[in-house]
Image (cartoon, grey):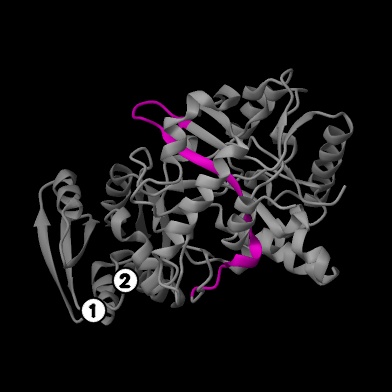
Amino acid sequence: MENNAIGRLRRLGVGTPDILIPKKNVDLKKWAVVACDQYTSEPEYWQRVENYVGDNPSTLRLIYPEAYLEEKDPQKRIDRINATMAKYLKEDLFDTYKESFFLVHRTTGEGPGRWGLIVALDLEHYDYAEDSKTYVRATEGTILSRIPPRKQIRKDAPLEFPHILVLISDQKKSIIEPLIDQRKTLQKVYDTDLMEGGGHVTAYQVSEDRLDDLSLAFESLHAGLDPQNPLLFAMGDGNHSLATAKACWEDIKKTLTTEEIANHPARFALVELENIFDPGLVFEPIHRVLFSISKEDFLQELGKHCSSFIFENVENLNEIESILDTKGDLQKFGYADEDGLSIVTLQEPQSSIAAGTLQAVIDSLLSDQNSISVDYIHGADVTKNIGTKRGNIGLFLPAIEKSTFFDTIIADGALPRKTFSMGEAHEKRFYMEGRKIKNI
């Protein structure tokens, strides 16, 4: 008989997964590696990881680092991934935590670290379309061309090891935070340092007797949503990975009976939920630099996306950051070129946030047959240094407000791509937990 709490969670798109963790004799510092979409232009990073891992069991053997996506024979690496998954299963490498959630704590240096809850999300409740009204949604535009190569990697894999981070908007702190207070009464699953400056991560198994309280907390969160637009889970990191899982599930579903569809393991995807109001969770803006462009061309295009704009010269980067950090009704962004720094204030912009307005300007500029190009930059200092070179323009975006993030997704749909980042590369999620996605 199904646990009532598990059934209530299922109705909200939350599954209680059977989580796989390597047995105690496995070195978890060598097992866990950072998300595959990091350090894509730094093959030397992945070579260091290769050298460190050596012949030890590692998720490095179970993922496809995107730094290698352009190699000549990708299928060879994919076949090797699937063979290693089968080998690890045959060798009984894993302990299985049946129908479990994990409470996880990640620290990366200064600050309190961030807390998360490992769950499975029902892909039937996920839609990455910009006008989606499902419980689980993309927060940035999904680039459809990125799905097929990832689908090749997942479609025959017996296991998944996710780096997906999904946000909940739990201002009352009723879901994850009570578990934090109770963590000393929970069974510790792992406690390990992470390689390459990744910090430290600890996990606790959430016992079955806590599921009833959790289900009630999720139901309470759901009860406060607009029934016509009930956004419960918003993508943080790994949207293209979740979109790939969805694409694979849609293919598998066509081959199944109604009864098989209800409980097939590929219907779910393992993710880490994080409360957007966790003080350890930092939203950082991703800035833009345009190359081979004149100020006149930029301003001409900008004028097509608002009724008017005002330039105000500023002395330094601190002044830009201070102004952008100040809440206000007017849309603003920072600007840099060889002549210096400015703040730009927009009147009646066509998008509700500066990232949307600027991305529309950039897309229009790039669509013309010219030499203009763009790069997306983490860090204001780097943006200034590159943006003030002759022929370049740097654009500084304000950080996304946590308090209005979910409201913006509900009102506008998915944000423009590269709007925000949840931490730097070394702070991204490391692969640790696994789950079977085939009936084996």
CB atoms at circles 2 and 1 under 8 Å apart?
yes
Question: What kind of element bears circle 2?
Answer: helix
Identify which amino acid the numbered label 1 is placed on.
Answer: Cys
Tell me if residue 371 is in the magenta stretch: no
The answer to whether 285 appears left or right of 48 in the picture is left
- Horizontal and vertical percent for residue 431? 62, 37
**Quarter of the figure with residue 342:** bottom left
Q: Residue at x 40, y 70 (%)?
A: 410
Camera sees residue 154: yes
Question: Is residue 347 positioned above or below 262 on the image?
Answer: below
Q: Residue at x 67, y 60 (%)?
A: 244
Task: Rate crowding at label 1 as few (under 14), some (14 to 19) or many (20 or more) other CA atoms within 10 Å.
Answer: some
Between 398 and 215, the one lying in front of the other is 215
Between 70 and 278, the one lying in front of the other is 278
The answer to whether 75 appears left or right of 430 in the picture is right
Q: CA distance from mark 2 to mark 1?
A: 8 Å
Task: Rate crowding at label 2 as few (under 14), some (14 to 19) or many (20 or more) other CA atoms within 10 Å.
Answer: many
Chain-order first, disc 2 or disc 1 = 1
Q: Which residue is mark 1?
A: 306
Identify which amino acid the numbered label 2 is placed on.
Answer: Thr
Camera sees residue 401: no
Q: Which residue is mark 2?
A: 357
Hey, which residue is sitting farthest top in the picture?
25
- Horizontal and vertical percent for residue 106? 48, 32
Q: Which residues are magenta?
A: 106-130
- Horizontal and vertical percent for residue 225? 41, 67
